[in-house]
Image: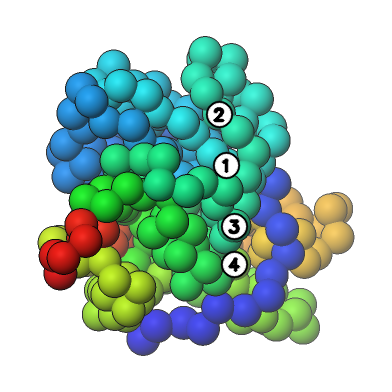
Amino acid sequence: MEREANSAGAQRWDPVRYAEHGRFVAELAGPLIELLAPGPDDEILDLGCGDGALTAAVAPGCKRIVGVDSSPEQVAAARMLGLDARVADGHALPFDSEFDAIVTNAALHWMKRPDAVIEGTWRALRPGGRLAGEMGGAGNVARISGALMDALGRRGIDGESRFPWYFPTPDAYRRKLAARGFEVAEMALVERPTTLPGDISGWLETFAEPFLGAVAAPERPTMIAEVQAALKPALYRPGTGWVADYVRLRFLAVKPRAGEG
Ligand code: BEZ
C-alpha cells in the first residue's frame, strides 16, 4: 500500500552522527552509480547530497558535479570535501537546463511533495538528460516504523501523523514521472536488508527524529529501548548484528529531446 504523505516534525542532521551511523548509505550506492553511468562530459546534480560522500565518489568521472541539500550542516560537511555544495529545497530546485544528469540517493523519500520535486528535476535537466535515483520504496523500514508508531501509540501519540517518509510503489512513481513527460527506462523495487554499522539505537537517533521528537527528551531513551526490544527478534542476527528492513526503489528516467517521446 502506498502511504499518504502527511505532516511531520522536522528531521535535523548531525554530520558527525551521520558519518558514524549513515556512511553505509553512500557505500551501498554502487548499483545507482552504474545506472547513472557518468561520462566525462556530464554536468551532474546530486539531489540530496548529504555530507557529499556520493558526490565525491561520482566527481572524478564527470565534468562537473553540484550537490544540493536542505541541511546547512550537511552542506557544510560536503564543502569541507572541496565540493560545490549548496543549500536548496528539493521541492524548489533553482536550476534551468543546467545538467546532463541528476543522481539522487536515499533523499527523495524525505520529500513529501513528489510532484514538485519531479517538476524541479525536469527543469534542471537539459533535453536528453537522465534522472537516476534510489529511494525507499513501498514497504521500506516497515518493521522499524511500525515499532516506532507502536511505542508512540502506547504514549497516546498518533505516530501515523508523524510518518516522515514517502515510500511509493513502482507503479505510482512511474506514473508520476511519465505524467511530467519523462521516459522511464528502469523502475525496480528491490528488497535490500542492510547490515547496520552499530546498534539499532544509533539508526533511530540518526534517522527517526520525527518520531522520537514527539516525546519529551528524558523519555526518549526509554522509548528507544522499547523499540529496540520489539525489533530484536526480527532484525537482530547473532554474528551479524542489526539488519534494517530496507526496500529500495531504483529508477532511471530520461527527459526526451524535442521530437522524441
Ligand atoms: C532509507 O534510506 O531507506 C531510509 C533512511 C532513513 C530513514 C528512512 C529510510
Q: Which amino acid does label 2 sit on?
A: Ala
Q: Name the residue under label 3.
A: 92
Whether label 2 touches label 3, CB < 8 Å: no
Q: Does label 3 point to a residue whose CB lies under 8 Å from ligand 1?
A: no
* Image quadrant containing the C terminus: bottom left
For the residue carrying disc 1, how many other residues have a C-alpha within 10 Å: few (<14), some (14-19), or many (20+)? many
Q: Between marks 2 and 4, how big is the CA–CA gap? A: 24 Å
Mark with earlier residue (2, 4): 2
Q: Nearer the viewer, mark 4 or mark 1?
A: 1
> What is the secondary structure assignment of the residue under circle 3?
loop
Q: Which of marks 3 and 4 is nearer the N terminus?
A: 3
Residue at 66% across, 80% down: 161
The three-letter code of the residue at mark 3 reads Ala
* Residue depth check, mark 3 versus mark 4: number of the one nearer the observer: 3
> Is residue 61 toward the left or the right of residue 108 in the image?
left
The type of residue carrying mark 4 is Pro
Counting from the top left corner in percent of width and height, residue 204 is at: 58, 51
Of callouts 2 and 1, the N-terminal one:
1
**Of residues 172 and 238, the one drawn nearer to the viewer in this rendering:** 172
State the residue at coordinates (23%, 25%).
41
Whether disc 4's CB lies below 8 Å from ligand 1 is answered: yes
